[in-house]
Amino acid sequence: MERITVVKIGGNVLDDPEALDRFVRDFAALGGAKILVHGGGKLATRLAGQLGIPVRMVEGRRITDRETLDLVTMVYAGLVNKRLVAALQAAGCNALGLSGADGDIVRARRRAPQPVDYGYVGDIERVDIPLLRMLLETGLVPVFPAILHDGAGELLNCNADSVAEGIARAAATLAPTDLVFCFEKRGVLRDPADERSVIARITAEGYPALREAGIVSGGMIPKIENALKAVEAGVRSVRIKRAADLLDPQEGTTIASC
Amino acid sequence: MERITVVKIGGNVLDDPEALDRFVRDFAALGGAKILVHGGGKLATRLAGQLGIPVRMVEGRRITDRETLDLVTMVYAGLVNKRLVAALQAAGCNALGLSGADGDIVRARRRAPQPVDYGYVGDIERVDIPLLRMLLETGLVPVFPAILHDGAGELLNCNADSVAEGIARAAATLAPTDLVFCFEKRGVLRDPADERSVIARITAEGYPALREAGIVSGGMIPKIENALKAVEAGVRSVRIKRAADLLDPQEGTTIASC
């Protein structure tokens, strides 16, 4: 394989049929080996409301009791994943949906209940790299919901950004790997109110100055620091951009080692 | 591959945690290449009730409008499939869940709306045999919910018995294949009231006499005629037995060509 692109797509695109249609076409047109990681948060929250399951979030993470685990397994690994796979197949992309339990391809470790007991929530632990290679070499396109397992029979609800990053690190051992986070903004902005103020490139060397100047702040800090860690761990580049700009190499912010 | 066993497991076992635990252990212990096909009807009906989605059945088949399709996709391809896969992984069986859309492995054709419009319901059309072979040769154990797709972006709700039969026919082109239908009775009974009256073997030659004598009647007629067709199409044997007897070769009814 010459290269691998790992794309993470979030809830905003999944909830908008027109944006989703376009994303599916664009992702299908992306050259080289590729992997999709998806969320699905809003659908789960809507269904939880219909079923009377209380939604509890702590620092943006869903507290996942048994009922909620069943719910996110249905929505992420079932509805969202299979809809995406069927749509990608129709667009000529040989997608294959995989929770972490499928083929034991991605294991997670359940989070310790201290300081916050998130319930059935885990963090990515290891990827079966030979199986990933076999699938990619066969021309298959893995599509991952953020539902992993612990290998002992328990499914675990995980953070899709972290799953994308962990899978990109594993892919980077097979071929040069680029990780793309699709979100609602055009990239990392110098001025949050100005969509034209995208910072084109952030490097490990340049980042501390951006942070000190307060240009990178709030929720962007962990995103960029994780991206820098991924790059340090061997991922060639991490891009943060709008889903609609997926095929445009000029758009978004690139985070690279140098 | 020396042989392939295709097992179909129905809703009764899936709804009983103890029976399911035992089935998972027994299926994991089954030798040779193997494939699991599962239903999940009761869970879907229960969730439909909670969500206020009306359940309409015609001749035992679920009328599947858009809402119901989403529901069965969530329950069969999401919750039931991923629970089974995670439990099989914990039992040492390298299970991999696959809707028909995943890797485009099984396509279905949507049913004509005449004489009954079942909605998003289809019948198995073709299996990607090279992909199935690759998975089995890698030691993976495909686990299929009866959610297939039409290749044009539409998921389709299918009958799990028919899916199991179609997959067994495809598997039979790779290696001698045995198909096992697990259900709640010990097999085909001479006397429906007497569980000890299991008919050990039904052949194409012997079947007409059983039917004429009224020993095979009602819902058993299509089951056995389908099984005979599968055998005619190259499946080595079809067995009808209790899930609890999966590993016991003496139990159940075998349907074979001679």
Image: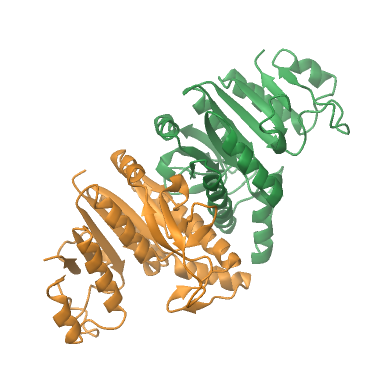
Chain colours: A orange, B green
Residue B227: x percent and y percent? 65, 26
Q: Decide if residue A106 is on the left or right side of residue B33.
A: left
User: A228 or A216, which is in the foreground?
Assistant: A228
Q: Residue at x 54, y 75 (%)?
A: A55
Q: Residue at x 14, y 82 (%)?
A: A209
* Residue A1 appears anywhere in the view: yes
Residue A74: x percent and y percent? 54, 58
Q: Decide if residue B166 is on the left or right side of residue A20.
A: right
Residue B53: x percent and y percent? 65, 62
Q: Which quarter shows the C terminus of chain B?
A: top right
Residue B221: x percent and y percent? 74, 28
Q: Decide if residue A9 is on the left or right side of residue B3.
A: left
Q: How many marks?
A: 0
User: A146 or B227, which is in the foreground?
Assistant: A146
Quadrant in the rendering for residue A206: bottom left
Q: Decide if residue A105 is on the left or right side of residue A236.
A: right
* Residue B16 appears anywhere in the view: no
Q: Is residue A49 above or below residue B39?
A: below
